[in-house]
Amino acid sequence: MEPLVLYQSNERIANITINRPEKRNALNPALIAELTNAFLTAQHDENVKVVVLKANGEVFSAGADLAYMQQLQHFSYQENIQDSTALKNLFETIRTLSKVVIAQVEGHAIAGGCGLATICDIIFAVPEAKFGYTEVKLGFVPAIVSCYLVQKVGETIAKKLLLSGDLFTAAEALQNNLITSVTKAEEINQIVDDFAVNLSNSASGNSLMLTKQLINQTTNTWLDNCLNNAIEVNAKTRESQDFKKGIAAFLAKEKIKW
């Protein structure tokens, strides 16, 4: 059986690759756990200065997978707390990693997959990639990612993206300061590699770590409170009738009428 996450390091750069192309790299508890472990491996690897997150297949990540969503219907409140905490821990592992994390987005990044890209330090995307925080259209709440998105793009843009739940292009993501660069598909591998190598060769690893920490520390207290509240909101939302209606319609492939 193929591993869900591939890890490879070379020339002080670690490549972490989501490896569920047959499931559109959809997130489930096992994948979230393996991604967390992969980033912790990079954290403890003294030879690694930069981490590149990418995905095999045509989609970066489509969010939660069907089997996982079916399970969510039967989770208790405490199980939902634990589940949301696992996602928060993955995002916080990436945010607080002492290494620079680059996302290489070569396909759509939707819902939790969009959150995964959002949390990275530098984001390169191909023009064809679409982004979207689609949770509200399914009766979910984009609770955890909202804490990071408001900080990253500001309240006005965050409300537009999170409340509409609409998909948007890589060009729009760049315009909204969500991503760093839009790069042609045939060039993105080389450009990301060149950027990572240059960063690794031209900057002190200690300086990169401390600079990232300084940027993070400007909102640490507020963010901790926001994330704790987000976990509770997620759990409470999953007990709502709207959530049950949204999940049922999604699984039945029916259009939801709110």
Image (tube, helix red, strand yellow):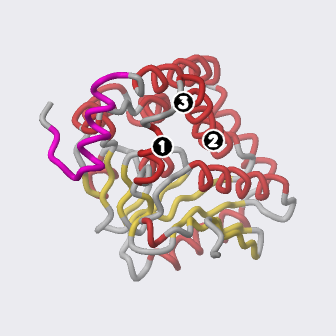
Which mark's residue is nearer the viewer, 3 or 1?
1
**Residue shown at 78% from the left, 52% from the top:** 43
Residue 190: image x %, image y %?
52, 79
Residue 145: image x %, image y %?
46, 35
Main SS, magenta region, reads: helix
Compare marks 2 and 3 and give the one earlier in the sequence: 3
Compare marks 2 and 1 and give the one earlier in the sequence: 1
Residue behind mark 2: 95
The one of 77 and 199 positioned closer to us in this rendering:
77
For the C terminus, the image quarter is: top left
Q: Residues within 10 Å of mark 3 (few under 14, many from 20)?
A: many
Residue 30: image x %, image y %?
62, 53
Q: For the magenta stretch, what is the residue range?
A: 240-256
Residue behind mark 1: 71
Residue behind mark 3: 80
The one of 179 and 223 positioned closer to us in this rendering:
223
**Residue shown at 50% from the left, 53% from the top:** 27
- Classify residue 141 by image quadrant: top left
